[in-house]
Image (cartoon, rainbow, N blue to C red):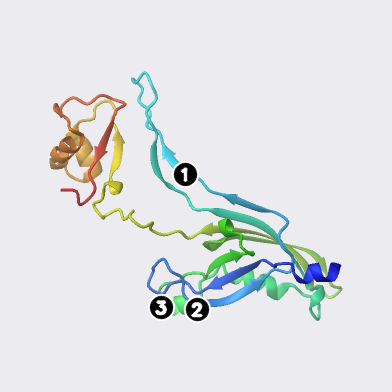
Amino acid sequence: MPGESLDKMVRASLEVYAPPSNGGTDPGVGVDTIHLQFNPAELALVKEAAWTRHHVRSAPRTAVPEFTGSLPRVLAMTVLLDGADQRGGSVDARVTKLLECCAPTENSIDADQPSPPWVRFCWGDFASVSFLAYLRTLQATYTRFSSQGSPQRAVCAIKLEEIGGATKGQNPTSGSPSSRRARTVVAGDSLQSIAYQELGGAAAWRAVAELNGLSDPWRLLPGTQVLLPGRHDD
């Protein structure tokens, strides 16, 4: 029956969490759940990887790009709010709840660590769009009003950006091989200049030479890549 299928429909929601009190990567306790009246008709999920390509004017071939990091997921959706199910028909309180996700909480201000709450979009077992995030953009367009000027319907464009956090085994100060970086040699580079620019001291050139197995550390070919030691590499 049509009524039964409607009752079984899974509704999407936005879970709201207190921001971490210690500046960590785990949220605080859940403080609210914003239930969406109507499931979004469309979700737009964007994930990008950042790469840098160093150009060398005298090189006959382009250099291999350097991976510089994984960018956060961004989820965009449009949500319809309708006050027909409430006495007075106003959607102002529901829009205000969303607006509060863009402002620091009172507890975070009192702790001298002002931060808006963290959120997570949830819809059944839809895992790829369910991640801890902050509400980056909210645009509310009011489309219906009562004769007294009360907003009765609003279309809200929402954009969430992933909070992220350190991935296991990827601590940049761990000294593991994964913490190393590569530098593309350009004309005029020397091991001393690379060590000074990338590691903070020209004396570190010996560690760079040893890591790359350079038998002649004074000859560097533009366009080649030099592996840089991690901060705690011996």
Amino acid type, mark 2: Glu
Q: Residue at x 27, y 46 (%)?
A: 177
Q: Residue at x 41, y 59 (%)?
A: 165
Task: Examine the image and state in which quarter residue 113 appears.
Answer: bottom left
The x and y percentages for residue 44 are 63, 51
Query: 10 Å neighbourhood of mark 2: few (<14), some, or many (≥20)?
Result: few
Whether 35 is drawn above or below 210: the answer is below
- Is 170 left or right of 33, judged from the image as shown? left
Mark 2 highlights which residue?
Answer: 106
Residue 111 marker: 3
The x and y percentages for residue 212 are 20, 34
Mark 1 highlights which residue?
Answer: 49
User: Quick check: marks 3 and 1 in contact, CB under 8 Å?
Assistant: no
Q: Earlier in the sequence, mark 3 or mark 1?
A: 1
Query: 10 Å neighbourhood of mark 1: few (<14), some, or many (≥20)?
Result: few
The residue lying toward the viewer, choosing from 152 and 230, is: 230
